[in-house]
Amino acid sequence: MKVLFRLLVFVLVVGGVALFVVSKYNNTSLKPETIDLTVDCSDLDNILVTKAVNVTVKNLSSRSHKDVSVKIVAFDAAGKEIQEKFTTFSRTLPAHSIYDKPVTLSTATKRCDCTIVDSHPE
């Protein structure tokens, strides 16, 4: 009985070490990683007959992302939704980096909200 128990413990230890080594070799993780992207669209500028917002996406995770899609909703002075736009950052967003992009909105826009719709982590 002791031999069987020792054999089982040995197999579990060797299997755990092998799994750890293989996961490091393949650049994978045994635990789930948090994908942390933030988006900001508070920088609203007047441009002649339209308004432009600077959409800034910040990657706080250790993974890069491709094709980050952002939804921008524009509101007027009364808080009524007047426009909805989608934009995509087609470049790869490296780990711990920031990209920004100007997006034109309606002249009546007083504030806007933005959310990340989709991304493809690598």
Image (spheres, grey):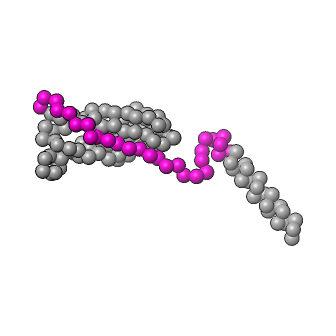
- Horizontally, residue 30 falls left or right of residue 93, namely right
- Horizontally, residue 76 falls left or right of residue 60, namely left
Q: For residue 28, what is the image quadrant?
A: top right
- Horizontally, residue 1 falls left or right of residue 33, namely right
Q: Residue 27: within the magenta? A: yes
Q: Residue 32: within the magenta? A: yes
- 70, 111: nearer the viewer: 111
Q: Is residue 31 above or below residue 39?
A: below
Residue with the most extreme top position: 48
Quadrant where the N terminus sits is bottom right
Residue 49, percent across and down?
12, 31
Residue 83 visible (yes or no): no
- Horizontally, residue 23 falls left or right of residue 115, namely right
Look at 37% across and 33% down and name the residue there: 99
Look at 54% across and 52% down and name the residue there: 32
- 52, 15: nearer the viewer: 52
Residue 63, percent across and down?
50, 40
Residue 101, percent across and down?
31, 33
Look at 47% across and 47% down and name the residue there: 35
The span shown in magenta is 22-49
Look at 28% across and 40% down and name the residue there: 41
Residue 122, percent across and down?
50, 40
- How many callouts does the rendering have? 0
- 40, 117: nearer the viewer: 40
Residue 44 visible (yes or no): yes
